[in-house]
């Protein structure tokens, strides 16, 4: 048995980064999401992440998904395993490897846009608005 349980805040959740001032574009921005994933598994497992496409989209305006890094928060929750920071892409990447079995194991996530990304042409100068993309998490028993 393996499942990503109800109560996972990443399910249908929104991660909002706001860029208003020049300082916003010249500093790292982090949005923390507590209990982003809650997994129950009767075997050890991996957690992978991928974007639904190559870009965050706002009408015809695009921002590449690789501006975003996802990693386990410092207070990572109750999920064990080897945790890696992942630069988001449309390919599956391992966020947590070989997590031990357990019930309602939580993983807190940080979503990060480094200053080097927000001050680059990938974000700087883009029209204001909400840019969206689906991010999919998959838990797979080993």
Image: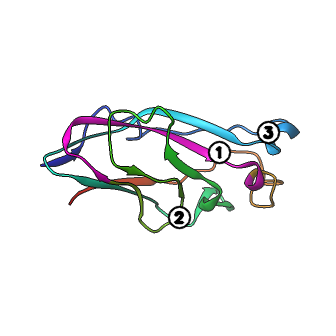
Q: Residue at image x 49%, y 34%?
A: 33
Q: CA distance from mark 3 to mark 1?
A: 16 Å
Mark 3: few, some, or many residues within 10 Å (few <14, many ≥20)?
some
Mark 1: few, some, or many residues within 10 Å (few <14, many ≥20)?
few
Is residue 110 magenta-colored? yes
Residue that mark 1 sits on: 130
Q: Decide: is 94 above or below 76.
A: below
Residue 140: image location, x then y, percent: 25, 58
- Among the two numbered marks 1 and 2 on one chain, the one whose residue lies closer to the N terminus: 2
Mark number, residue 89: 2
Q: Is residue 105 left or right of residue 92?
A: left
Residue that mark 3 sits on: 24
* Quarter of the figure that contains the C terminus: bottom left
Residue 131: image location, x then y, percent: 63, 50
Residue 111: image location, x then y, percent: 56, 43
Q: Are marks 1 and 2 in contact (CB under 8 Å)?
A: no
Q: Residue at image x 54%, y 34%?
A: 32
Q: Is residue 95 left or right of residue 2?
A: right
Taking the view exactly as shown, the residue that stands out farthest to the right is: 22
Helix, strand or loop at label 2? It is loop
Q: Decide: is 24 above or below 125.
A: above
Q: Are marks 3 and 1 in contact (CB under 8 Å)?
A: no
Helix, strand or loop at label 1? It is loop
Tell me which segment is drawn in magenta: 98-117
Q: CA distance from mark 1 to mark 2?
A: 19 Å
- Camera-side mark, 1 or 2: 2
Q: CA distance from mark 2 to mark 3?
A: 23 Å
Q: Quadrant of residue 110?
A: top right
Residue 26: image location, x then y, percent: 83, 44
Q: Decide: is 16 above or below 66.
A: above
Q: Residue at image x 53%, y 64%?
A: 89
């Amino acid at each position: 048995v393996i499942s990503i349980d109800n109560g996972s805040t990443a399910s249908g959740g929104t991660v909002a980064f706001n860029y208003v001032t020049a300082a916003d574009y010249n500093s790292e921005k982090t949005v923390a999401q507590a209990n982003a994933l809650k997994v129950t598994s009767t075997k050890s497992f991996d957690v992978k992440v991928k974007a639904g496409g190559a870009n965050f989209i706002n009408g015809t305006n695009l921002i590449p998904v690789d501006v975003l890094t996802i990693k386990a928060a410092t207070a990572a929750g109750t999920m064990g395993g080897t945790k890696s920071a992942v630069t988001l892409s449309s390919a599956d990447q391992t966020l947590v490897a070989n997590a031990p079995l357990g019930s309602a194991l939580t993983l807190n996530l940080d979503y990060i846009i480094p200053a080097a990304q927000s001050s680059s042409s990938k974000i700087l100068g883009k029209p204001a608005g909400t840019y969206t993309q689906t991010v999919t998490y998959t838990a797979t028993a080993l």
